């Protein structure tokens, strides 16, 4: 799978998810990282995690599971990291819910 294989809807979805990472977790907002995330999004059946870093440092990762949808975590356990993870996961949970409801229609 390459990013050329993504549909327009998949590209929009990948962009929306990465926007959450930028806004909530300080992911780098550049074409290279967005392209890497698009590739990950397209290959997520084979790859379960994407390291985006941002405010969570080197260990900042977003995960995809068929059960939980999208969520982030990292290796740090301090209050700042916990707050970043909680607000990012809250935004991703809302995104997951909206997407699930849209697919049920």
Image (tube, rainbow, N blue to C red):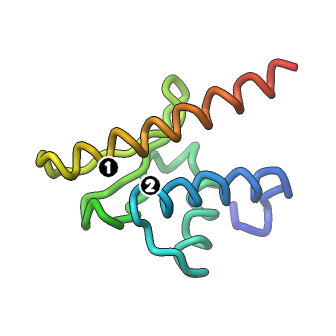
Check disc 1 and report the residue beneath it: 84
| Residue name at image x 71 percent, y 50 percent | 13
Mark 2 or mark 1, earlier in chain: 2
x, y percentage for residue 48?
A: 45, 45
Residue 63 sits above or below residue 19 on the image: above
Depth check: give the residue in front, 79 or 32.
Answer: 79
x, y percentage for residue 97?
A: 63, 26
Quarter in which the N terminus is drawn: bottom right
x, y percentage for residue 26?
A: 40, 65
| Residue name at image x 20 percent, y 52 percent | 80
The residue tagged with tag 2: helix, strand or loop?
Answer: helix
Residue 24 numbered tag: 2
x, y percentage for residue 12?
A: 76, 56
Q: Is residue 47 left or right of residue 43?
A: left
| Residue name at image x 27 percent, y 44 percent | 83
Quarter in which the C terminus is drawn: top right
Q: Is residue 68 left or right of residue 11?
A: left
The residue tagged with tag 1: helix, strand or loop?
Answer: helix
The reply to whether callout 2 and callout 1 are in contact (CB within 8 Å) is yes
Depth check: give the residue in front, 94 or 3.
Answer: 94
| Residue name at image x 79 percent, y 61 percent | 5
Q: Quadrant of residue 25?
A: bottom left
Residue 86 sits above or below residue 101 on the image: below
Q: Residues within 10 Å of mark 2 (few under 14, many from 20)?
A: many
Q: Is residue 47 left or right of residue 38?
A: left
Q: Estimate the spatial distance between the alpha carbons at disc 2 and disc 1, rounded to whole Å.
A: 7 Å
Residue 102 numbered tag: none
The residue most toward the left is: 78
Q: Residues within 10 Å of mark 1 (few under 14, many from 20)?
A: some
């Amino acid at each position: 799978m390459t990013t050329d294989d993504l549909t327009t809807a998949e590209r929009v979805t990948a962009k929306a998810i990465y926007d959450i990472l930028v806004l909530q977790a300080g992911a780098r907002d550049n074409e290279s990282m967005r392209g890497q995330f698009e590739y990950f999004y397209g290959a997520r059946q084979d790859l379960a995690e994407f390291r985006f870093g941002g405010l969570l440092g080197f260990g900042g990762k977003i995960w995809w599971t068929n059960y939980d949808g999208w969520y982030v975590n990292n290796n740090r356990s301090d209050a700042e990291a916990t707050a970043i993870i909680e607000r990012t996961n809250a935004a991703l949970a809302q995104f997951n819910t909206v997407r699930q409801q849209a697919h049920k229609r």
